[in-house]
Image (tube, rainbow, N blue to C red):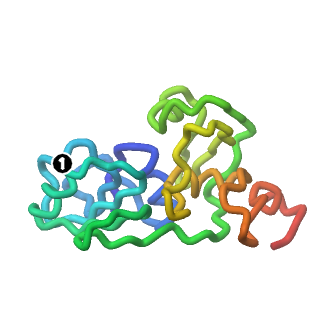
Amino acid sequence: MIFLNNLEAVIESIYLEDTLSGKIGECNVFVNPESIKYITSKTVIISIPGYDEDKIKTLISNGCKIVSRVFYDNPDIEVQPYILRLNNNIMWNGKTIYSYGGSRNLIDSGLAEYSGDSLYFPKIYDPSAETMDAFGNLTSIGWALQQVGVNIKTNTCFTNLDIIKTGKVVL
């Protein structure tokens, strides 16, 4: 079970096909946690570049397994980039934005909506939105954008997924 603390956790739960909970005690997986005070012997997934190195060191010393979707040059971090595949639980919500403002802003402003096990996500065309690391690994936002048809990675058969999800085109 994944702790529901941010949009990245929602995206990760859809990617891993795992459930979410708002109760810390029920969860074994935490995504980009801000508060790490009580996280011990859990799995922590980092899905953004630039996550606080001091927090990583603390989590490792607390016995946590660190898995990252983006590259970190640290032997204690297991890098497992997102694998592109069609996921029907992330759908374009018909909104397009040009100013990202961060993942927290997407939920708070109603630009992204989570219902049941589905995420309705906008297309974001803001170059300041971190969608990939320096090695071409997608961030959680990049993976979600690829799912709604913003072709972050173009050298793949998984492009224009928004059109494929309408059923008008078959992959």
Q: Nearer the viewer, residue 97 or 156?
A: 156
Q: Is residue 164 above or below residue 48?
A: below
Left or right relative to 156: residue 49: left
Q: Position of residue 67 (x, y in %)?
A: 33, 67
Q: Position of residue 113 (x, y in %)?
A: 57, 39
Residue at 63% over, 44% down: 121
Left or right relative to 48: residue 118: right
Q: Position of residue 69 (x, y in %)?
A: 43, 64
Q: Which residue is labeled 1 in the image?
A: 36
Quadrant of res 94: top right
Name the outermost residue toward the right. Answer: 168
Q: Position of residue 128 (x, y in %)?
A: 56, 37
Secondary element at image label 1: loop
Residue at 9% over, 62% down: 61
Q: Is residue 80 above or below residue 60?
A: below
Residue at 72% over, 55% down: 151
Quadrant housing the N terminus:
bottom left
Left or right relative to 61: residue 87: right
Quadrant housing the C terminus:
bottom right
